[in-house]
Image (cartoon, rainbow, N blue to C red):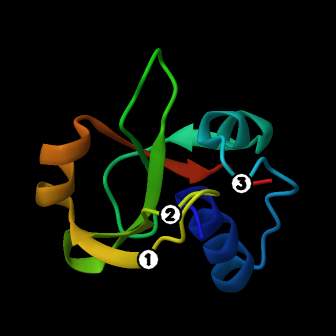
Amino acid sequence: MDCFGVIVLYFREVHGVELGAVPQTDIATGFMQASGWEECSEQAGATCFMSWRDGSPTHCGILMPRRMVLHSDGDVDRPGSVRLTRIAALSRVVGEIKFYRRAPC
């Protein structure tokens, strides 16, 4: 599973929200196509977009309690593992992390 797949599955299973069909390997396009995001403060349950390139995220995850991020390192070419990583360790690798939540409908 790729990292945006974790986001899609999390929203489906935890919130009962379908983000719709999104490209499997293009996080930035998936993020743009899944309307209804708004930036928020760091809080458990927030979606984390990170590893920014040219104004677009290239990695994402979900902020869990105790400042852990649920994310995956897989892509189409190689299977990835879903894991929990401390946000402090992850930010050292990916740089700036921005937090978003789904806007109320």
For the residues bearing labels 3 and 2, Cβ distance under 8 angstroms: no
- Which x, y percent locates residue 10? 61, 75
In the image, which is nearer the foreground, mark 3 or mark 1? 1
For the residues bearing labels 2 and 1, Cβ distance under 8 angstroms: yes
Residue at 71% x, 43% y is 30
- Which x, y percent locates residue 73? 42, 62
Indicate the quadrant containing the N terminus: top left, top right, bottom left or bottom right. Answer: bottom right
Residue 44 appears in which quarter of the rendering? bottom left
Furthest residue in direction front, as rendered: 77
**What amino acid type should be assigned to the residue bearing mark 2?**
Gly
For the residues bearing labels 3 and 1, Cβ distance under 8 angstroms: no
Q: Element type at marker 2?
A: loop
Residue at 26% x, 35% y is 96
On the image, numbered disc 2 is attached to which residue? 74
On the image, numbered disc 1 is attached to which residue? 81
- Calculate the distance from the C-alpha at mark 2 to the C-alpha at mark 1: 6 Å
Left or right for 16, reference 79: right
Residue at 76% x, 45% y is 34
Q: Residues within 10 Å of mark 1 (few under 14, many from 20)?
A: some
Q: Element type at marker 1?
A: loop
**What amino acid type should be assigned to the residue bearing mark 1?**
Ser
Residue at 45% x, 67% y is 72
Depicted 49 relative to depicted 54: above or below = below
Furthest residue in direction right, as rendered: 21
Does residue 29 appear in this view?
yes
**What amino acid type should be assigned to the residue bearing mark 3?**
Pro
Q: What label sits on residue 104 in the rendered view?
A: 3
- Calculate the distance from the C-alpha at mark 3 to the C-alpha at mark 2: 30 Å
- Which x, y percent locates residue 99? 41, 46
Does residue 47 appear in this view?
no
